[in-house]
Image (cartoon, grey):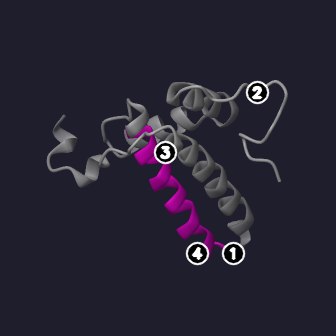
Amino acid sequence: MDTPFAYHPDVPEPGSPATVLAYAERLLGIQTWLTERAAHGAWPPPASPADYLAWIEDEAAIQEEQAADHPDERAGRLYQALVLRAVATHLRCMGVVPTPLPWEVPDAHLR
């Protein structure tokens, strides 16, 4: 099973967090998906690699929890979590540290 960062001759090694996010967006729509999730919750959208890392790790945890609650969707949700964790691992290996999620910061919804 390939992850988005499995070796492929047309995919350059990620050189920066922005490159990782751009590739993940092109392949999976991660930035669009998380921006839409933020809008749905009326939260400020992720803007920096650190923001995206926090949201990516949160979404991976949600998919892992949902896999237990939805046995018929288990494989798809766990694969989604695996891909999200792969992106997060690349970002963390580049030194990105996640920011607190908006709901973890008092009055973040007012920003």
The answer to the question of whether label 1 and label 4 lie on touching residues, with beta carbons closer than 8 A, is no
Mark positioned earlier in the residue sequence (3 or 1): 1
Check disc 1: other Cα within 10 Å, few if <14, some if 14-19, many if 20+.
few
* Image quadrant occupied by the N terminus: bottom right
Residue 106: % across, % down: 15, 50
Q: Which residue is mark 3?
A: 92
Q: Which residue is mark 2?
A: 11
Depth order, front residue of 91/30: 91
Mark positioned earlier in the residue sequence (2 or 4): 2
Quick one: SS at disc 1?
A: helix
Residue 53: % across, % down: 45, 43
Residue located at (57% from left, 61% from top): 63
Residue 59: % across, % down: 50, 53
Q: Which residue is mark 4?
A: 69
CA gap, disc 2 and disc 3: 20 Å
Quick one: SS at disc 4?
A: helix
The numbered disc on residue 71 is 1
